[in-house]
């Protein structure tokens, strides 16, 4: 299906949440990696989410200042906000929940965002951007979420590239 053109590399972007119940957006530009003419796509192997407080010295639970949750999603289409898990544009997601009264925290998003490292394993992206959306329900100081996308560049056959492009366009509706 795909011929690897590069080894795996990491794309990184940070989102800083400065307000409660307000979606915050960022993008990862893929224009240098995706080429329609050469049927070149980005193969996503895994996505990691790192939650941090206002600085490296401040823990995220201190920045939250109380019970609440932090959610972050990566999509390959601009939906303009958070999406449900069945949306085809969803590439990866994370949800961190904290209950300060019971001194508990957990990750409610149990689906691993790991597609494997084999030549046929991965999520193929043919769009020129990845869109990051994040939101928190509790905050006293800034909350930072670093998104790390582990990917490689691949060449697809004409049929495979067209199928992925059509599926992406259909998901846009």
Image (spheres, helix red, strand yellow):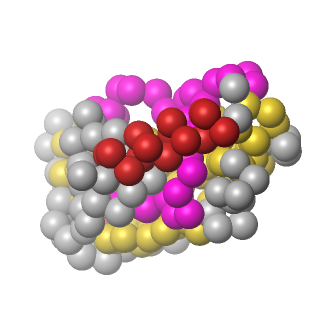
In the picture, measured across the screen, residue 9 lies left or right of residue 46, that is right
In percent of width and height, residue 132 lies at: 42, 61
Choose between 89 and 27: the one closer to the eye: 89
In percent of width and height, residue 152 lies at: 74, 44
Q: Which quadrant of the figure has residue 121?
A: top right
Task: Mark yes or no: residue 49 visible.
Answer: yes
- Identified at 64% across, 67% down, the residue is 31
Quick check: is 57 in the magenta stretch? no
In percent of width and height, residue 1 lies at: 69, 26
Magenta stretch, residue numbers? 107-133
In the picture, measured across the screen, residue 75 lies left or right of residue 31, that is left
Q: Note whether 13 is above or below 113 in the view shown.
A: below
Quick check: is 119 in the magenta stretch? yes
In percent of width and height, residue 168 lies at: 42, 46
- Identified at 65% across, 57% down, the residue is 36
In the picture, measured across the screen, residue 68 lies left or right of residue 29, that is left
């Amino acid at each position: 299906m795909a011929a690897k053109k590069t080894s795996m590399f990491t794309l990184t972007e940070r989102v800083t949440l400065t307000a409660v119940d307000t979606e915050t957006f960022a993008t990862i530009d893929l224009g240098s990696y995706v080429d329609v003419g050469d049927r070149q796509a980005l193969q996503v192997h895994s996505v990691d989410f790192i939650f941090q407080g206002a600085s490296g010295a401040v823990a995220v639970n201190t920045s939250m200042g109380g019970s609440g949750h932090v959610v972050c999603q990566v999509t390959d289409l601009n939906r303009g906000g958070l999406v449900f898990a069945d949306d085809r544009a969803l590439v990866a997601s994370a949800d961190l929940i904290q209950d300060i009264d019971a001194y508990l925290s957990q990750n409610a998003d149990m689906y691993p965002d790991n597609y494997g490292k084999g030549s046929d394993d991965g999520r193929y992206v043919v769009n020129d951007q990845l869109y990051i959306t994040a939101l928190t329900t509790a905050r006293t100081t800034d909350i930072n979420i670093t998104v790390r996308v582990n990917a490689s560049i691949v060449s697809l056959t004409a049929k495979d590239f067209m199928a992925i492009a059509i599926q992406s366009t259909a998901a846009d509706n």
